[in-house]
Amino acid sequence: MGGETTKRPHTAYTPEQRALALAALDANAGCVAATAAQQEMPRTTLEEWSKGRGVTSEVTELRDVARHSLADGFEDALHRILAAVTPEDIIKASLRDKMISAGIATDKLQLLRGDPTQVIQHQHVINAYQALVNQFNREPGEKSRILIMYLISDQVRRRRVRLGYS
């Protein structure tokens, strides 16, 4: 039948279900598609919640509780995985799998605790950009502004290439 669409029945989610889904979203570093698939729910619903739509203060409080509970579970899993690594495992190929699991559990734990998963210090880059912006604001001429904007965009481009983004 041309032009007809089937609509999913509307699901009413409890605050606890919303909180758990949002905590899982946190554990997945904000990846809506993966979290929606894991939670077996529509991606669009989770995306709306991630933007704060349909999220009450109760859901926010429950989300924090759920996030900490998930973090505790990942921490327990991490301890079990690390405790299972024996000197004999170093010789076996399965050690790689255990270490990957430990890394994933560590990453999830850090995400759920709100800790950075990567610490990068680039104060020299920030200082260089700030100097260019200050110069941009001080220089009255159009040519000076164009040159300084070029220098800033060139620095951004070089950084992106160096980091493998371009």
Image (cartoon, helix red, strand yellow):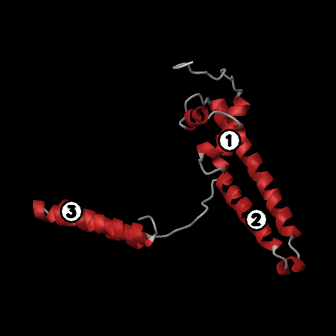
Q: How far apart are marks 1 and 2 (CA)?
A: 23 Å
Where disc 2 sits, the SS reads helix
Q: In this view, does 13 lie above or below 67?
A: above
Q: Position of residue 144 (x, y in %)?
A: 14, 65
| Quadrant placement of the N terminus | top right
Q: In this view, does 150 lie to the left or right of 60?
A: left
State which tag comes first along the sequence, 1 or 2.
Answer: 1
Q: Distance between the residues labelled 2 and 3?
A: 48 Å
Q: Which of 124 and 49 is in front in this view?
A: 49
Residue type (three-letter) at the residue carrying disc 2: Ala
State which tag comes first along the sequence, 2 or 3.
Answer: 2
Q: Distance between the residues labelled 1 and 3?
A: 48 Å
Q: Please give the residue where the numbered disc 3 appears in the rendered image.
A: 136
Where disc 3 sits, the SS reads helix
Q: Residue furthest front?
A: 1
State which tag comes first along the sequence, 1 or 3.
Answer: 1
Write down the quadrant of residue 139 in the picture.
Answer: bottom left
Q: Which of the two marks, 1 or 2, is nearer to us in this view?
A: 1
Where disc 1 sits, the SS reads helix
Q: Please give the residue where the numbered disc 2 appears in the rendered image.
A: 102
Crowding around mark 2 (Cα neighbors within 10 Å: few <14, some 14 to 19, many 20+) is many
Instruction: Please give the name of the residue rendered at 74% of the width and 59% of the height, measured from the top-left corner.
Output: 105
Q: Please give the residue where the numbered disc 1 appears in the rendered image.
A: 37
- Mark on residue 69? none
Q: Position of residue 20 (x, y in %)?
A: 71, 38
Q: Which of the two marks, 2 or 3, is nearer to us in this view?
A: 2
Q: Position of residue 137 (x, y in %)?
A: 20, 60
Q: Which of the two marks, 1 or 3, is nearer to us in this view?
A: 1
